[in-house]
Amino acid sequence: MAHPVRSRLGVLLGSTTPPEQIGAQARAAESAGYGELWIPEDYFFLGGVAGAALALGSTARIPVGIGVVSSVVRHPALLAMEIGTLARAYPGRLIPGIGHGVPGWTAQMGLTQRSPMSALRETLTGVRELLSGKTVDEDGRFATFRQIAITHPVPDGVPLFTGVLGDKGLELTGQLADGLLVSALAPVEYVRAARAKLDAAAKAAGREQRLGISVLAAANITRDPDRIAAARAALRPVLAFYLAATGPTALFGAVGVNEQLADMLARGGAETVAAEMPEEWLDVFGIVGDQDSARARIGEYLDAGADSVVLATVVPEGAEETLAVTGELTREFTH
């Protein structure tokens, strides 16, 4: 059976999107021709599973991803039950993403784990087995299963993505998952390296399938050449906020700026980063400018090994124009 043609451009709804607007925004994304829609689960904003249900119920074709649930917030059996419910109701359209979770948020709930990687491994394995119809009876470092089986498994399977950054996470993804959701602010260099590491890990695990990579990209695009400077200025504090919240990591190490970022953070927070970050960081960690700039940057991510680029409209006042301008590119990037 041939796979339907769909755009390699996607959309991430902002975590501050009012729940009552999810349906309308999901329909708008589908009508515009975007190839996938992602719902965030940023604690304590939108519920990713409930948000995905709203989006799926309001649309007819577009795949909907959850990007991403923390492996430590729900027991794997509960997560498998939720995933199975949606996957059965909307066959072939759900893409669940599972990651470690932002440490600050999980700490607020008293859910910090000594071995986050064990929790992620046990969650991926447990969810996969339960969705396949198996009865699971195991004692893990993170999760306990006492003869658990879900009533509504998904025999055809559900693609499980991870949201990880480091080499250990990429290796685990290559072994157990179906794809990777790359965090926003990823340089092209990181995506290229992640593609190579993911392929190597999958090959070492004896897997022949190509694992998907969807890249989240913080975007602020304008149609008016006279407003490009304003679009860049509006993106700067938002990128600075996320750079400060994330801190030095593999994403930023890919372009050798961890030491510079750490120095800024040692002397202040997001305000210091916003004031001192070089202008070129806007182009390295985001998609900003006019339609031609967006087209070129999207192409760079795809050439680096991404299968799709998911636009995150992180500047609220520029969201509508960003989606309108990039929506005109959906037919250019199809597979």
Image: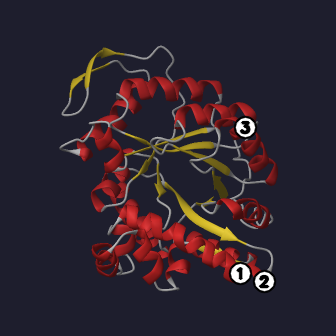
* Along the viewing direction, whichever of 318 and 272 lies nearer the viewer: 272
Q: Residue 130 appears at what percent x and percent y? A: 40, 24
The image quadrant of residue 132 is top left
Give the residue at x 73% y 48%: 4
Question: Visible in this render: residue 250?
Answer: yes
Mark 3: secondary structure? helix
Give the class, few, some or many, for how many residues have Cα within 10 Å of label 1's Cα (few <14, many ≥20): some
Q: Residue 331 appears at what percent x and percent y? A: 79, 63
Query: Which numbered dot is residue 25?
Result: none
Give the residue at x 42% y 76%: 273
Mark 3–mark 1 Cα distance, whole angstroms, equals 31 Å
Give the answer, above or below, for where 211 lies relative to 24. below
* Along the viewing direction, whichever of 73 and 161 lies nearer the viewer: 73
Give the answer, above or below, for where 66 lies relative to 133. below
Q: Residue 28 appears at what percent x and percent y? A: 78, 47
The kind of residue tagged 1 is Ile
Tell whether label 3 touches label 2 (CB within 8 Å). Answer: no
Residue that mark 1 sits on: 228
The kind of residue tagged 2 is Pro
Query: Which numbered dot is residue 23?
Result: 3
Q: Residue 199 appears at what percent x and percent y? A: 40, 61
Give the class, few, some or many, for how many residues have Cα within 10 Å of label 3's Cα (few <14, many ≥20): some
The kind of residue tagged 3 is Gly
Residue that mark 2 sits on: 225
| Mark 2 or mark 3, earlier in chain | 3
Tell whether label 1 touches label 2 (CB within 8 Å). Answer: yes
Mark 2–mark 3 Cα distance, whole angstroms, equals 32 Å
Give the residue at x 45% y 72%: 192
Give the residue at x 67% y 75%: 231
Give the class, few, some or many, for how many residues have Cα within 10 Å of label 2's Cα (few <14, many ≥20): few
| Mark 3 or mark 1, earlier in chain | 3
* Along the viewing direction, whichever of 327 and 60 lies nearer the viewer: 327
